[in-house]
Amino acid sequence: MTEGEGMRQLYIFDGLAGSDGPPLAQLRALAARPENTRFFRVAAEAVQASFDHVGAQVYRRELPGGLPLRELLTGPPAPPAVLGHSLVQGICAHVYQLCLLQPGPDAAPAPVAAAGHSMGVQAAIAAGRRLTDRRSFLRFSRASISLAAMIMLRCHQVFEERVASPAVTRAYQERAAAPAVRPTAMAAVLAIDEADLRARVAAYAGPVELAIVNSARSHVLAGTPGALAEFWLANADDFERRRVRWMFLASTAPFHSSLLAPAAELIHGDRGVLDYEVTGDGLALPVYVAEEPRNLQDRPDLWLDFVEQSFCRPVDWLTTVTTAVAATRPDQVVDFGPGPGARLFTRESLRHAGYSVPLKALAPR
């Protein structure tokens, strides 16, 4: 019997790889298996096609050498600046998740539903399609990976204000006693209620948005690095008294904010070169997205939902995962990673809502 058979499972998928970087060791091990040769060839071709489409002028600003996936998975280790780039993390996370979803004799049993955090919604859609024919799965994977790469490229193409001014950077470093920290486009804010943080953001005049509600007291802000640093400085005394924790994340773009909305127009223009056509009635099981909880089976065209949910709409993971559990009553939540973030926030959110559901991290077979 396949592990998990007979259990009602909810699949969850994280977006970026998190602070540990892309799942390079796992991807290298998966790519070395003969049965995965075709999948990784398709993945490498899909990534290259998107890079070629946007052009060297766009991608070289981010990755001067592009992203040759085969070399990344078989050659010498890439520099930390490459591995830490959100573009690389997002693409590698999606490739990893799709590899784990491949059909075959050892494939996991069908879940009762799937939910995706941030870009993880694209892998959740793949799980929802339940493609059991390998050729169909590879064709879908090519389109899905191309779209993921295109989204990451376009997001970075439209984001210009990437560095805080020297004066703001210095003020932050001195007040935070963190001389090595440079402000980035996203910051985690912990040990504060959503309503409190939302009110502070609303009262602030700069480009700062509540991008992600991960759990009841764990959130992420997005904005320009300078505005985020100034927001923290304006609230630092109160945060310190109330033991609110703040940490700039290694994100190279302000995901889940309106600052990236111009990328949506570019990606809509790319639709003609992407063979990605999925409708809600093509999903064999409920797939939940993380802005306002809804099942994508009810949507006629998933293009807009995925494209915008991936980067310029806010994420409410707390409400989404509790809605999915309430609607489907799973016996187990299975985390496809690649990082531990979605699993951690799911555990916190379910505990907050009074649910007791075991969570399991899926390890590559």
Image (spheres, helix red, strand yellow):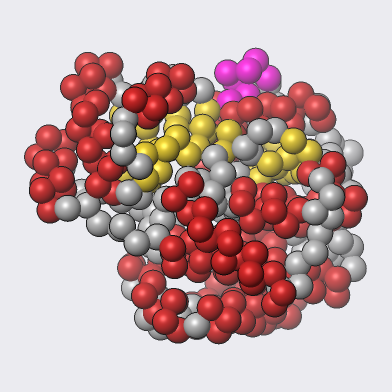
Magenta stretch containing residue 362, yes or no? no
In-image side of 230 versus 132 (left or right): left
Region in magenta: 349-355
Quarter of the image with the C terminus in it: bottom right
Q: Say which of 236 and 313 sits in front.
A: 313
Q: Say which of 240 and 10 sits in front.
A: 240
Q: Position of residue 203 (x, y in %)?
A: 34, 25
Residue 141 visible (yes or no)? no
Quarter of the image for residue 239 reads: top left
Residue at figure coordinates x 22%, y 52% from the top left: 164
Magenta stretch containing residue 353, yes or no? yes
**Above or below for 169 versus 352:** below
Q: Position of residue 326 (x, y in %)?
A: 76, 24
Residue at figure coordinates x 58%, y 62% from the top left: 265
Residue 241 visible (yes or no)? yes
Q: Position of residue 67 (x, y in %)?
A: 48, 78
**Above or below for 179 versus 39:** above
Quarter of the image for residue 51 reads: bottom right
In-image side of 297 versus 248 (left or right): right
Residue at figure coordinates x 85%, y 75% from the top left: 135
Q: Say which of 186 and 53 sits in front.
A: 53
Principal SS element in the magenta part?
Answer: helix
**Above or below for 296 versus 330:** below
Q: Could you tell me how many numbered marks the image carries?
A: 0
